[in-house]
Image (cartoon, rainbow, N blue to C red):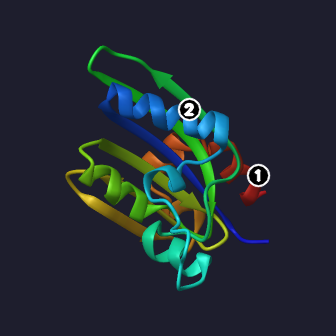
Amino acid sequence: MSNLCNNRLKLIGDSSFLQELFESITKERKFFEFISPIPKNISESVNSFCRTEWGTKWDYDNECDVVFTEGKKTSGLSMYFQTPWSPPIGIYEKLVEMGVQVEGYYFESGLSFYGHFTNEDGNNEGQYNSLSEIPEYIVNVFELTEWIEEQLE
């Protein structure tokens, strides 16, 4: 069983594109593959392709909580999902290339790292050695106060 990386993501972009992405996630359970499909005749291993192109070994793990907020030209998607070992930075970069505004946060307690990704700043990752070193914005985004208190008991 892999360590699961927790991800919170907000996307703002073209309404029709985000509607299609929302339907792919909710009906077909495909997020990363919608953005960057696995080639039919792949010459490398699928895991290798996924790590290189997506930044993680496979599409999101377990359930994906997703909310679609529709606008006329621009819409939004808010999501919470888990990925194996690492966040899908490759997917975030592809979304930026597609003209989508990306704001992503991630936290992996097993490997003790956290970070955020935005169009303007790219990927910013950090490590922590003790729970007191987890930045307040990560504690707030992932509502970690109670978890931290339990870990310290």
Report whether 47 appears left or right of 119: right
Circles 1, 2 touching at the beta carbon (< 8 Å): no
Which quadrant is the N terminus positioned in?
bottom right
Considering every residue shown, the one lying at the far bottom of the view is 44
- Mark 2 lies on residue: 23
User: What's the residue at 60%, 83% (across, down)?
Assistant: 45
| Residue 37 point in image, percent of width and height | 49, 60
Q: Is residue 124 left or right of residue 64?
A: left
In the rendering, at what x and y percent does residue 28 appear?
Answer: 65, 41
**Residue that mark 1 sits on:** 150
Q: CA distance from mark 1 to mark 2?
A: 37 Å
- Left or right? Give the position of 39 relative to 108: left
Q: Amino acid at mark 2?
A: Glu
Q: SS of the residue at dot 1?
A: helix
Question: Judging from the image, what secondary structure is the residue with disc 2 in?
Answer: helix
Circle 2 Cα neighbour tier, 10 Å, few/some/many (<14 / 14–19 / ≥20): some
User: Residue at the location (33% across, 45% down)?
Assistant: 102
